[in-house]
Image: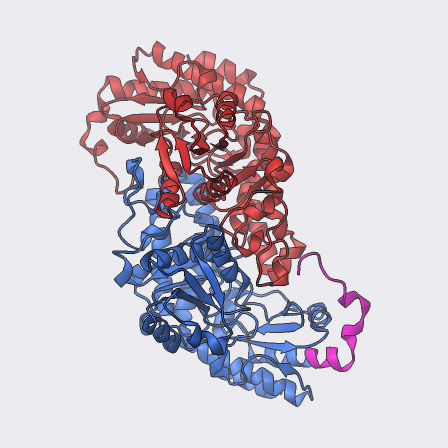
Chain colours: A blue, B red
Amino acid sequence: MMDRAKALDAADPLAAFRESFILPEGVIYLDGNSLGALPKATTAAMTRVVEKEWGEGLIRSWNDADWFAMGTRVGAKIAPLIGAKPHEVIACDTVSVNLFKLISAALAMRPGRKVILSEPGNFPTDIYMIEGLERQGLATQRLAPRDQIMDALDDDVALLMLTHAHYKTGELFDMAAMTKAAHDAGALVLWDLSHSTGALPVDLNGVHADFATGCGYKYLNGGPGAPAFAYVADRHHADFAQPLTGWFGHARPFAFSDEYEAAPGIEQLQCGTAPILGLTALEVGVDLIAEIGVDRLYSKSRALSEFFLECIVERGLDLDLVSPSESTARGSQLSFRHDNAYALCQALIARGVIGDFRDPDILRLGFAPAYLRFEDMAEAAKHLAEVIQTEEWQRDEFSQRAAVT
Amino acid sequence: MMDRAKALDAADPLAAFRESFILPEGVIYLDGNSLGALPKATTAAMTRVVEKEWGEGLIRSWNDADWFAMGTRVGAKIAPLIGAKPHEVIACDTVSVNLFKLISAALAMRPGRKVILSEPGNFPTDIYMIEGLERQGLATQRLAPRDQIMDALDDDVALLMLTHAHYKTGELFDMAAMTKAAHDAGALVLWDLSHSTGALPVDLNGVHADFATGCGYKYLNGGPGAPAFAYVADRHHADFAQPLTGWFGHARPFAFSDEYEAAPGIEQLQCGTAPILGLTALEVGVDLIAEIGVDRLYSKSRALSEFFLECIVERGLDLDLVSPSESTARGSQLSFRHDNAYALCQALIARGVIGDFRDPDILRLGFAPAYLRFEDMAEAAKHLAEVIQTEEWQRDEFSQRAAVT
């Protein structure tokens, strides 16, 4: 398969973009869906923001380096990646905090309805943030399995909140169909795009989504703990309100008024002072992904995972794939169930193939299309086959759990 | 006065620490209370976290570089600066978001009481965050002028929320007396330490404070939009709960359970994924301030502002000081009321003396004791006198307001 891999790499229109990233020697990185790789341009941008803008410009950089507009500027650059208009997206806070704002906004727009509907096994923080609003007595959590969500949409549901690409299996929701069903039931819709943005095409405007949020540190390559983004459809800008009413969301923060007056547009999603170092790194990643283009990334993403499956079949592996077998039905990842997934993952890491273990029994491999090669697929499949076929994973050292995994 | 300034600098035990900061040529920086200067060690730390930990270590650095513990580690280092125990402080989110968590926690601990008491003219975000909880129907804002706060503490007050050093005037509250009064009325107390931490001694444990939060980008020199910190007295750790229940505050985030279970200690204040780049810069600033020591910083802070006042008197200036005239009664700043404060501030900036304008008529000068010299005081006073005495501030260019000031 290595010959075919090399031929595919030679024909890959995105091949040259690998050079835009730092990738350590001897590593095949199949975890860009957990923390994206470092763009080469990030180091210069961080030097600029730290040494020049902060060190030399000091407080003046809020104006001179346009720090005040960073959240909206980076948001506007993310917008075309997710089918939104530039003024509908802002980069701020974390996915978790943004979920709280947007769920709260939905509840306020649907008085008399308290149910937030999601699915069990959604990414934990999504479910936990509903629990936070339950603590406040403002929301009621309802979780329905994927095939029963439509039936669970009744008059009590204020908001349907789903993750487009499932973090564990990669399974995709039909955003258009789910959004329409929710709207037909009088509910609003919030999409978590953490495992989609930068790898798959998303069309928030096209499906008439109300709200969305997503992660900056996965396929957007914004760095560890990068700021997240949030989207509010502009038809709601005049009448949405959220409770994290900090000074950066004020219409005139420097009037220092005692009365809160929300900024008129998406800016009202900001709360505290914008995290300039994190936004600077995020902007570099977003610029790079925008330059490559989501449609091209999506094509390559599917080709990579399809080729990887071919490679493991050819290696004689018969693994339990829990991701959809059709590449159009999954995100940019493949997940396999294995009784010894943890040890398997550790044995691969020892060979330089970095994937993810997800409790209790999932080996998750992510295919970041911006910097992975077909050669990496063939090589990773070889390692996976060897680790399993030689039972290398049974070594004691691979079953010791790290403190945090 | 310059001779005396030079003598004071020569005798200053903290003089050498100026070399630990980057300070641009030709600038006298009197705005470290808005954005602290760049520690020299920060650039190496940022290179390490970006190039080595992110670029080379990738996802492994959550364990190998101990990213998971950064919030608690930095919090534990801030703790001694504010009279707290290491496990009572965590670095996370922004001051605004932390206010929301802590106000919410207080409301839950005082069922039947809904009033959050503060003072008019408190830093806007503090007041705005109460308004956010009013939007949710969970809180009632009550603002009482400083001399009427004691009388406003009645059976409806769940929380007294005050800022130790006033952002505009620098006036200090007596933390012990106010905390005791609130407790006597059955209320809890939350202190905003944004304008105190790293410049003034604070003794949260000594005054029996319940909650506190503060800023990382002022006297802690953590960089623009640095993460904030939050404190919860350990006597409340078993029974406090807050509604921003994200996955980083979970007892076992990587169990990926559908049920939220709060981490047992201060970690439950975390919400989304920790902002590693921002925390890295903050840690450098905190380490440096801890090394210098708050008591020495406080002595020098008072000496600087007292000397500055002597200098302007000697220059024949008779300014309207709105800060307390006793240095023990104010934070590390001096604020002057002037009808043309904006133009005055701009004229000073044009001469390289960077202070702050605060709407509508305040010129605010901050004295960051870690890196300012007595020589800077004499020099700044000279510029201030010249700008006023020659009416230089009347030039047209100094009255043009920037888009954001």
How many labels, in total? 0
Q: Vertical placement of B390 versus B347: above or below?
A: above
Left or right relative to A186: residue B110: right
Position of residue B313 measured from the top left corner of the image (x, y, whole percent): 35, 11
List the single residue furthest toward the left: B396
Q: Residue at x 30, y 65 (%)?
A: A85
Q: Vertical placement of A232 versus A328: above or below?
A: above
Residue B244 in the magenta stretch? The answer is: no
Can you see residue B77?
Answer: no
Q: Which residues are magenta?
A: A383-405
**Is A184 or B204 nearer to us in this picture?**
A184
The C terminus of chain B: image quadrant = top left
**Is A247 or B269 nearer to us in this picture?**
B269
Position of residue A280 measured from the top left corner of the image (x, y, whole percent): 44, 53
**Is B61 or B13 nearer to us in this picture?**
B61
Position of residue A372 measured from the top left corner of the image (x, y, whole percent): 55, 74
Can you see residue B311?
Answer: yes
Q: Vertical placement of B108 versus B174: above or below?
A: below
List the single residue furthest toward the right: A396
**Is A130 or B389 nearer to us in this picture?**
A130
Q: Quadrant of residue A7?
A: bottom right
